Structures are given as C-alpha cells and as structure tokens.
Image: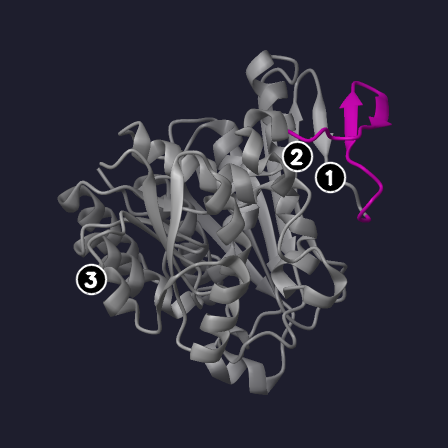
C-alpha cells in the first residue's frame, strides 16, 4: 500500500461532499472522480481541481493508481458497483444501503473476504455527534445497563429521483437500525414487522409495497434485548427525523420531538435537555471544519440529503477518516461487510415480514 490512500469517487451529487475531505486528509489523495454527465463531471472537477475524470465507472476501476473507490450512486447501483470495485482489487466504501436483496449482501460479504479488500458501508448515524455522545455514556457506564432501544427515520421523498418512488420503507432502514445495534454491540437475529396505512396506487405500483409506515421489532442475537424501529417515506405528515432513543437503568437518552429543541436526558424522575457537543477534535486538524461546514451548507447549493439531514450530524469527515485509516492500519473498518450486511438485512427481512402479515423472519448469518 502506498503511503497515502488514493481515492476515486463515483457519483457526484451527494458524493461531492467528500471531495474536499479526502483532499485535506493527511493520509489520502483525492485522485479521480466519475460521473456519467460529462458537463457536471468537468464542472465539479474544475471547481475542486481534480484532474482525473471518468464518465465510465469501468474505466475508473481500470486505473491502476486508484487504491479505493467511494460509491455514492443510486441505490440500485450499490451492490453491482461494490462487487465490481472489490473484484478490481480496490477497497470500497459505499453509501447506504449495502444492497437491496439478501443475496446481494451475501455476495458482497463473500467477495470482500475472497479479495482481502476492505469494504465499509458509510452509515452516517453511527458517526454523528449524537451517536458519539451516547456511545460515551454507554462506555463510561453512566447510562448503566441498556434495557431497550428505539429508532425512527421518517422522511418525505416526494421530489427525489424516480427510483425512490414507492420504495418499501424498510429497504432504506439503516439510519434507524444502525445506532441501536451499534450501541448494544450486537447483531440482529430476527424481526417481526407490520405495515400500516396506504400510499397511492401510483406509488404502490413501482415496487408492489402498499404501506405508508412499516414498524418492526428486532430481537438481538445472544442478548436479552429487543429494539423497535419505524420507517416512512411517503404520504405521512412528519418533520424529517433520524432519531434514536436508548433506555438504561441509570440514565436514558431521548431524541427531541422538534429539530433544534435538543435531546433529553432522563435520570430517574428528573429530565433535562442537553446540548450535544461536536467531536471534531477526534479528527485530523485539516478536516475538522467539515463536521459543521461542507459543500452543501450554502443555501444556493443544497443537496436534499444534506438539507433534510441537517448535515448528517457532522459525520462526513468521521466516515472518510475511518475508511482511510482502516486501510492504512490494515484492519477492518468499524462498519465492515458483515456488520453492514446484518444492518441492511434487518430492513430487507422486515419488509418481507410486513408483506406476510408480521411473521417472524430470521436474518441470515455470515459466518
């Protein structure tokens, strides 16, 4: 491995957010970008001073100087582009979800192991400042014994690209699933899920999924814990929220009901709001500012995922840092292929359960 990890990014909508982070990371080199729209490709390349530009992902993978690719393309492309990247000998980071089927998850796990290359699912929530705050409470023992966990991701997807229309809510569930399983330090064993409400016939026709809301109970493997998640994507009135609640025997953490109110800490009968600190000091100095600033923080240049997600809790530089350092240090990233597959399959299996009236669906194992 070279002294610095040479990175190529494919998909430059939300993906452009990571260009300056890799450029200013001390262990990375932002080598190449890839997008099918050549006008946009050159506009972004000129803006950030990236010289190597590809309108074909296959051509970018053939570049021997690229060590790692970061995939930020539409959901249907995640699995095939991840597999192609691994098979080309590249380390792969991919935005969520890992895939759309259990079989694709199994293929990625097997291919990462066969090739010996790192795979990391770039799940924002488990690198957000709120997650890091609660993780510290758990690790210090201040929260005590975890008793229950709850997550929600409610979002109105009208106006997003067409492949989102009618998407089963649980097929994009990792933002709600990941903080619960990560804080518990466990994988999911099985799920029961029920659908509720109904979306329009036009939306239902796209994927055959009729539900406005899907709610699941997750049994954690090798644990006495269970968790609850709720997902909605269309025709359900709710301010955007990616939230998680954690209940301990000493202290509990609850997400705010309205953005900007600050989370609530419960200590017995006492409750108080807490302002969660930033954790930029855990990052190399050159990328610390990107926990609060980024490509899409300007009003005239906002990407929907950044605007609705409030900058994803300052997670972007933490994600890039973990991916790069895992390669440099020759170790698995925190959200490796097995972890990503379990988190992703929770949603896939939950939707299967909802379509079958709430029956138990066991998650696959990746031993």
CA distance separating discs 2 and 3: 39 Å
Magenta run includes residue 275: yes
Mark 2 and mark 3 lie on one chain; the one further toward the N terminus is 3
The residue identified by callout 2 is 130
- How crowded is the residue under tag 1: few (<14 C-alpha within 10 Å), some, or many (20+)? many
Does the image show residue 332?
no
For this view, does 96 lie left or right of residue 338?
right
Mark 3 and mark 1 lie on one chain; the one further toward the N terminus is 3
Q: Do the residues bearing badges 2 and 3 touch, measured as CB atoms within 8 Å?
A: no
Q: Quadrant of residue 75?
A: bottom left
Choose mark 2 or mark 3, whichever is in front: 3
Q: Position of residue 306 (x, y in %)?
A: 64, 57
Q: Which residue corresponds to the image point at 72% horizontal and 59% vertical from the top-left?
A: 298
- Disc 3, SS: loop
Q: Relative to 174, does residue 206 appear above or below in the rendering?
A: below
Quadrant location of the C terminus in the rendered image: top left
Indicate which disc residue 76 carries.
Answer: none
CA distance separating discs 3 and 1: 45 Å
Magenta run includes residue 28: no
Q: Relative to 206, does residue 60 appear above or below in the rendering?
A: above
Pick the front one: 138 or 190: 138
Mark 2 and mark 1 lie on one chain; the one further toward the N terminus is 2
For this view, does 243 lie left or right of residue 37?
right
The residue identified by callout 3 is 62
- How crowded is the residue under tag 2: few (<14 C-alpha within 10 Å), some, or many (20+)? many
Indicate which disc residue 255 carries.
Answer: 1
Give the magenta-colored segment's residue range.
Answer: 258-279
From this viewpoint, which residue is outermost toward the bottom?
202
Does the image show residue 184?
yes
Choose mark 3 or mark 1, whichever is in front: 3
Choose mark 2 or mark 1, whichever is in front: 2
């Amino acid at each position: 491995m070279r002294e610095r990890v040479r990175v190529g990014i494919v998909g430059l909508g939300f993906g452009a957010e990571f260009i300056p982070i890799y450029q200013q990371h001390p262990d990375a080199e932002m080598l190449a970008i890839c997008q099918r729209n050549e006008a946009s490709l050159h506009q972004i390349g000129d803006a950030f001073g990236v010289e190597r530009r590809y309108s074909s992902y296959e051509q970018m993978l053939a570049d021997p100087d690229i060590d790692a690719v970061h995939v930020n393309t539409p959901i249907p492309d995640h699995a095939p582009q991840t597999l192609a990247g691994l098979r080309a000998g590249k380390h792969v980071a991919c935005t969520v979800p890992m895939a759309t089927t259990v079989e694709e998850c199994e293929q990625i796990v097997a291919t990462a192991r066969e090739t010996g290359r790192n795979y990391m699912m770039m799940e924002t929530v488990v690198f957000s400042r709120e997650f890091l705050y609660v993780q510290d409470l758990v690790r210090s023992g201040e929260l005590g014994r975890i008793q229950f966990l709850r997550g929600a991701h409610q979002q109105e997807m009208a106006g997003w690209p067409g492949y989102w229309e009618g998407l089963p809510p649980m097929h994009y569930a990792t933002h709600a699933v990941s903080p619960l399983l990560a804080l518990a330090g466990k994988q999911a064993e099985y799920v029961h899920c029920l659908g509720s409400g109904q979306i329009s016939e036009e939306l239902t026709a796209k994927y055959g999924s009729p539900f406005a809301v899907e709610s699941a109970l997750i049994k954690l493997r090798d644990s006495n814990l269970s968790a609850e998640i709720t997902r909605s994507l269309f025709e359900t009135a709710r301010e955007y929220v990616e939230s998680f609640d954690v209940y301990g025997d000493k202290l509990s953490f609850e997400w705010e009901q309205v953005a900007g109110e600050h989370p609530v800490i419960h200590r017995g009968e006492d409750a108080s709001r807490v302002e969660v600190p930033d954790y930029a000091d855990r990052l190399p100095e050159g990328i610390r500012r990107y926990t609060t600033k980024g490509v899409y923080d300007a009003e005239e240049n906002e990407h929907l995922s950044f605007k609705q997600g409030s900058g994803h809790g300052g997670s972007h530089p933490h994600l890039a840092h973990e991916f790069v350092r895992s390669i440099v240090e020759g170790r698995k990233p925190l959200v490796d292929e097995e972890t990503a597959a379990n988190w992703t399959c929770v949603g896939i299996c939950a939707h299967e359960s909802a379509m079958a009236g709430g029956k138990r669906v066991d998650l696959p194992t990746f031993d």
